[in-house]
Image (spheres, helix red, strand yellow):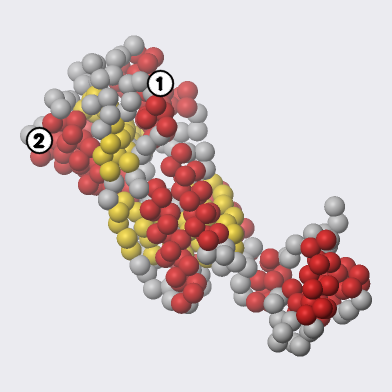
Amino acid sequence: MKNVSIKDIAGEVGVSTTTVSFVLNGKAREKRISEDLKDRILHVAARLNYRPNQVARGLRTGQTHTLGLMVEDISNPFFARLAKVIEDEADRSGYRVIFCSTENREDKAAALLSMLKHRQMDGFIITPTQGMEDDLREMVGEGRPLVLVDRYFKDLATSWVTVDNYAGAYKGVSLMLENGVRNPVLVSLDSPLLPVVERQRGYVDALKEHGLPYDQDNVLKLSFPGDQEKLAEHISAFLRNRPGTDGVFFTTNFLGVGGLEAIRMLGLDVPVDLRIICFDDNDLFRIGRPSITVIAQPVDKIAETAVRMLVNMLSTKDNSPVHETLEPLIIQRESI
């Protein structure tokens, strides 16, 4: 289908393209265009299903009323919900959202970021990957409005919103220990990103606080897995070699899902053989049996806060860094 242009509308109405442009950009009164002519132009534009070229408009006005959203994995329930709420909140403020997933790959993240920048986004909400710091520092230097969510870089002067990952992990592991677990293992990601590091630190400190030794052999760190079946195999092999294990802390929900499959493969019973807690919630954890205790992030509030921060930057033209750390919620279910 042919894209309708301002020239098409002008030809049908019998006026200049300049007149049509003034009307479509809300300048009819300023340019003393009659109400009758304005209505005719808008009627023809609607009938022809005219859609403005946002990039071209952005080059003229400096605004496209679009935001770029980059998350780790849109299929992950945490990021899917985050994207949905961000989209809804942005819409209420008059912005549309273009979103994409990095799959935690540095090369893909760099390519997507370049694409979003060239599409003249007014602002950006980003869950950064490892190795993205230099690209983000360049954006800050260019004065681009930017908010990081879920994770951030300590040495980068950006706005961000996250949760207290350390406190959530510490409280979650402590809950297991207070319910009789004496040899909990950690299943996490092999990553230097701050949320991962802080969740691992919470596990270690909870053990120490309860008088239990930390054993590096009780920690499994996995690279970002794309295959759920292989993930389950890795976790089952790890658990099989630790017969004294009576509890598991999974630091992300997709690790938790793979872990439940591994536990089923091993024929273990939760919570009789193993007590389980996972950072981040998932519908499977809530409706499955036994239901899984989680350290839940306030996803809606994270999203709402990120949009509020970004819209405020855009309205005030002030990109001064603002930080907000939210508290996670322990939801105790049948697995503990």
Locate residue 167, reporting x and y percent: 22, 47
* Residue that numbered label 2 is attached to: 210
Q: Which three-letter amino acid code belongs to the residue tagged 2?
A: His
Residue at the (35%, 67%) spot, across then down: 322
Q: Residues within 10 Å of mark 1 (few under 14, many from 20)?
A: some
**Residue 29 appears left or right of 19:** left
The dot on residue 261 is 1
What is the spatial separation of the Cα atoms under label 1 and label 2, in whole angstroms? 30 Å
Quadrant in which residue 175 is drawn: top left
Whether residue 3 is visible here, answered yes or no, is: yes
Q: Which three-letter amino acid code belongs to the residue tagged 1?
A: Glu
Q: Nearer the viewer, residue 231 or 305?
A: 305
Mark 2, secondary structure of its residue: loop
Q: Nearer the viewer, residue 254 or 113?
A: 254
Q: How many marks?
A: 2
Residue at the (60%, 66%) spot, across then down: 65
Residue 24 higher or lower than 292, as above or below = below
